[in-house]
Image (cartoon, grey):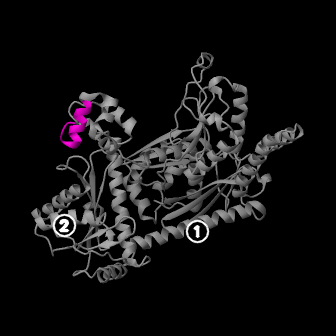
Amino acid sequence: MTSNAFQQLAHTIPSHAGIYKYYGEDGELLYVGKAKNLRKRVSSYFVKHHDNFKTRKLVESIDRIEFTIVDSEQDAFLLENSLIKQFRPKYNIDLKDDKTYPFIVIKHEPFPRVFLTRRVIKDGSEYLGPYTSVQKVRELLEVIKYNIPLRTCSLNLSQQNIRKGKFKVCLEYHLGNCKGPCEGLQSEEDYRDHLKQVKDILKGNLSPVLQMFKSRMQEHAQNLEFEKAEIMRKKIDSLQEYQSKSTIVNTRVGHIDVFSILTDGEHAYVNYLRVLHGTISDTKTVTLEKKLEETDEEVLTYAIGYLRDAFNSHSREIVVPFPIGYPEEQVEITVPRGGDKKKLLELSQKNVNYFKEELRRKKILHLEGKSDSEKKKVLYQLQADLELAALPTHIECFDNSNFQGSYPVSACVVFKDGVASKKDYRHFNIKTVEGINDFASMTEVVRRRYSRLLAEQQPLPQLVIIDGGKGQLGAAMQSIRDLGLVGSMTVIGLAKNEEEIFFPGDKESIKLPFDSESLKLIRRIRDEVHRFGITFHRQKRSKGTFKNELESIKGIGKNTATQLLKTFRSVNKVKEQSFENISQEIGPSKAKLVWEHFHGQSQ
């Protein structure tokens, strides 16, 4: 959009707080921004010259502008964050964070269960979190299980069912991990008291729980109930040990959010420390890609809004390294000069520096961003280590995978000049192999890949890596021989566990030095083929295109297949069962169909 074109609509822009949206000719949302005064902010894009190329390109691409007026700057900030997260416009800051975080749910049901979940369902349940670490969540749940007896079963514990005596206590009751609400041995009021203790622990507030346990221990000791007093003492020790593992700053610090930022060219890194009751309960570092001329203040403000929303933070104080114009009215912004908050900020800065250094180290490992001479140096090293006839400027790697007996798939990744060439990656649905046969699958995909390259007169790789060791290597070489390609390329097998390298026909493997650049590149290629193959599996499962192999058997429906999997856990386990075991589950006529599918004859 030109300045002249903008002048014709400038008078229509409101002088209120709100958000503005820039659209391109094809209707694509290019940019979302917020403003105290929409007319002044939008006009600034068109009435001055921009040194930044991307900003000039954005202005030239604008075909249409839309506005939304809101009541306050805070509302504009929240709406802008929401729209950026939803639409991810081309010219907005890109925050690279696509993970699904775990929650702890207190289920909305009689005698609520407490467990880990990644799915938040609006069913009245209470969700605590999210947490950045699944390991931390599991540790929390173990602490809770040891100290507070709660039920773990999925029974419908309605008062009517309990009165009818439908249930019997299980092993958890006899182990002391549950008080038996299923038989009416625990009241709902007592169970709610236990849940309150759980919430205190999950929120980092251990003092009330410890005080209660100490009180009960003294009470048991006074009544000469020394065994019960000893149980309470062990619970106190357990909670205090868990508390000592947490980084305690100062309980008087209370609830605060701490953020630090590190900028490096077009990228910025923001670390977040969540502090509850003076204890660091979680930490997260994210990468942001700057698209226009955003200042550190703008980037940090956006990241704070995103992370506080993602982690459901309601802390009334935010600690930052420099003043920012954060629009939430009831939130205090603190730039500490000393004391505990300054120490927390320094800790956050250490985290963000470490995160950036780790990214740098990985980038070096992956070769991206290296000069041509540096890339060639690694490839020359690989050529020498593997005694290759030609410099491996074109490397391909194959890997097979299957999902609980479902139809197998394979993946091939391609590296050129030591860097991933993603446009050349290929997925393979196995076509000629029945059942799960990794060797036959490898034979098929290698034949299909290189017969295609030959037919299209495409260049062949200098090095082919087969992930899976000797067996898979032999299967791949069968197709290489059939296609007359022996000697045209070097094919090696990579054992999954020991990172041993096998050459065709060799009895002994070779091992490259653990920290050698050659092995680092081979690891990178192997990890990439794993990632690519797993992504393919997930896409297939999400589209519902994976059917269990049992369902492909003529005469076996989905319900029968599901019944077998519930009992035997996987297709491979079904295959291992005797005819009699299968008959007991689904009857002799259907068992015969299953048995003949796997074994080729009836029993």
Which of the 4 image quadrants contains residue 270?
bottom right
Point out which mark residue 310 bears.
none
- Identify the amino acid type marked 1: Asn
Residue 305, horizontal then vertical, whole percent: 58, 49
Nearer to the camera, 470 or 584: 584
- Look at mark 2 in the image and give the residue it sits on: 477
Say if mark 2 contacts mark 1, CB within 8 Å: no
- The first of marks 2 and 1 along the sequence is 1
Nearer to the camera, 270 or 21: 270
User: Which of the two discs, 2 and 1, sits closer to the camera?
Assistant: 2
Residue 152 to residue 538: above or below? above
- Mark 1, other Cα within 10 Å: few <14 / some 14–19 / many ≥20: some
Does residue 277 show up magenta in the picture?
Answer: no
Q: Secondary structure at mark 2?
A: helix
- Identify the amino acid type marked 2: Met
Does residue 592 show up magenta in the picture?
Answer: yes
Residue 480, horizontal then vertical, whole percent: 16, 67
Query: Is 511 left, or right, of 556 in this rendering?
Result: right
Tell me if residue 505 can be seen.
yes
Residue 167 to residue 522: above or below? above
Residue 239, horizontal then vertical, whole percent: 73, 49
| Residue occupying the far right of the picture | 222
- Mark 2, other Cα within 10 Å: few <14 / some 14–19 / many ≥20: many
Tell me if residue 10 can be seen.
no
Nearer to the camera, 433 or 110: 433
The boundaries of the magenta stretch are 590-603
Quadrant (top left/top right/bottom left/bottom right) for the C terminus = top left
Real-space CA distance between mark 2 and mark 1, rounded to the nearest whole angstrom = 47 Å
- Look at mark 1 in the image and give the residue it sits on: 353
